């Protein structure tokens, strides 16, 4: 628990936005000390999720949704434990494991290095998009047999990260892997904060199956997709239709009042146009937008504004701005998305 707190502190210093994408798996015995540490993490590190052996009743109610209780069956054997850990990861995510998990009762204390095979099992649960696996340890001078075990399990012993180097190597490595594996970011009406997105077709299809309308602005062009469309539609950036869809999605994400009819019409009309002409141009324009959708009722008109119906779920995917790194990367690590 102490080392986990140190790692969270280091992430908060260097890459605080990673906290909301991180799940801590704490398998220490339940009790007052464990409950106190977990409550402190939840209070201090906004967005962090915790999987732990803790009674949900001792967790502050406002944070309870961020806690996944670990049951006795999850720790019954290596297969059950690996399955539980895998459930906390996104496909292609990042798993960081201590090489000495002394709280795993099914691994003999004198054969602690066998815990490395747990990570290999978790990795194998994702045949298409395997997570990156990195180990941290405060042990130095590994026995030759342990190095061979790491290599047999498909890991490079030279990549084991030193717990004493949290700021210098561990956290930069975590941020580096997240940057590479999740270069995109989804903001949606279903969640209060953005979540990381991988740049592969499986990730895209999952988003499009989950949302009614999705704006993609990741490759110098604007695309619209989602359940309300029969297929993706591509627009030239700055085109009137692209701008209107973007404004509608802006307003829906912000729970705004909608896009004023006059704003739409004036963008389409020539300078000096009369109000009636402006209104007619806007109406024809919105009629064309409704024609793209499987339900024209998805765009409503109220209080002289156009808006997406509140029942319509929307999202926007963009490239993440900047980088978390404050120095050159060394290796890798991070975890899931918040359950809201």
Image: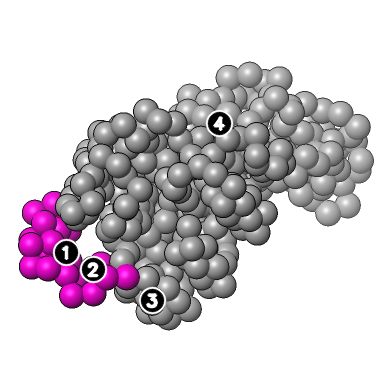
Tell me the tag on residue 159: 2
Question: In the rendered structure, which disc, 3 or 2, sits on the residue that comes first in sequence?
Answer: 2
| Residue 159 belongs to the span the image colors magenta | yes
Mark 2 vs mark 4, CA separation in Å: 39 Å
Disc 1 target residue: 156
Mark 1 vs mark 4, foreground winner is 1
Residue 74 position by quadrant: top left
Q: Does dot 1 land on a helix, a strand or a loop?
A: loop
Mark 2 vs mark 4, foreground winner is 2
Question: In the rendered structure, which disc, 4 or 3, sits on the residue that comes first in sequence?
Answer: 3
Magenta segment range? Answer: 138-161
Residue at (48, 33) in percent of width and height? 208
Q: Does dot 4 land on a helix, a strand or a loop?
A: loop
Disc 3 target residue: 164
Characterize the local packing of mark 1: few (<14), some (14-19) or many (20 or more) Cα atoms within 10 angstroms: some
Mark 1 vs mark 4, CA separation in Å: 40 Å
Q: Nearer the viewer, residue 12 or 228?
A: 12
Residue at (88, 52) in percent of width and height? 272
Q: Does dot 2 land on a helix, a strand or a loop?
A: helix
Q: Position of residue 149 (x, y in %)?
A: 11, 56
């Amino acid at each position: 628990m102490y080392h986990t707190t140190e790692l969270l502190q280091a992430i908060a210093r260097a890459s605080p936005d990673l906290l909301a994408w991180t799940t801590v798996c704490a398998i220490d015995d339940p009790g007052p000390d464990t409950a106190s540490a977990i409550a402190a993490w939840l209070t201090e590190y906004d967005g962090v999720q915790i999987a732990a052996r803790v009674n949900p009743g001792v967790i502050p109610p406002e944070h309870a949704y961020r806690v996944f209780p670990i049951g006795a069956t999850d720790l019954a054997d290596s297969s059950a434990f690996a399955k539980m850990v895998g459930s906390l990861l996104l496909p292609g995510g990042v798993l960081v494991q201590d090489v000495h998990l002394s709280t795993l009762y099914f691994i003999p204390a004198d054969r602690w290095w066998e815990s490395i095979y747990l990570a290999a099992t978790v990795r194998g649960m994702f045949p298409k998009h395997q997570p990156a696996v990195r180990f941290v340890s405060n042990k130095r001078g590994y026995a030759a047999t342990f190095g061979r075990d790491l290599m047999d399990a498909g890991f490079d012993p030279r990549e084991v990260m030193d717990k004493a180097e949290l700021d210098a190597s561990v956290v930069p490595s975590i941020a580096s892997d997240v940057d590479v594996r999740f270069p995109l970011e989804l903001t949606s009406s279903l969640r209060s904060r953005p979540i990381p997105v991988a740049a592969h077709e499986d990730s895209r299809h999952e988003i499009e199956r989950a949302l009614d309308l999705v704006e993609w602005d990741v490759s110098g062009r604007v695309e619209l997709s989602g359940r309300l469309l029969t297929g993706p539609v591509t627009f030239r950036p700055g085109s009137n239709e692209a701008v209107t869809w973007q404004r509608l999605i802006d307003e829906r994400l912000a729970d705004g009042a909608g896009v004023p009819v006059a704003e739409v019409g004036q963008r389409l009309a020539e300078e000096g146009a009369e109000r009636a002409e402006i209104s007619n141009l806007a109406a024809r324009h919105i009629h064309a937008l409704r024609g793209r959708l499987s339900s024209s009722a998805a765009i409503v008109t109220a209080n002289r504004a156009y808006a997406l119906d509140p029942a319509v779920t929307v999202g926007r995917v963009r490239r993440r701005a900047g980088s978390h790194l404050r120095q050159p990367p060394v290796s890798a690590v991070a975890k899931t998305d918040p359950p809201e």
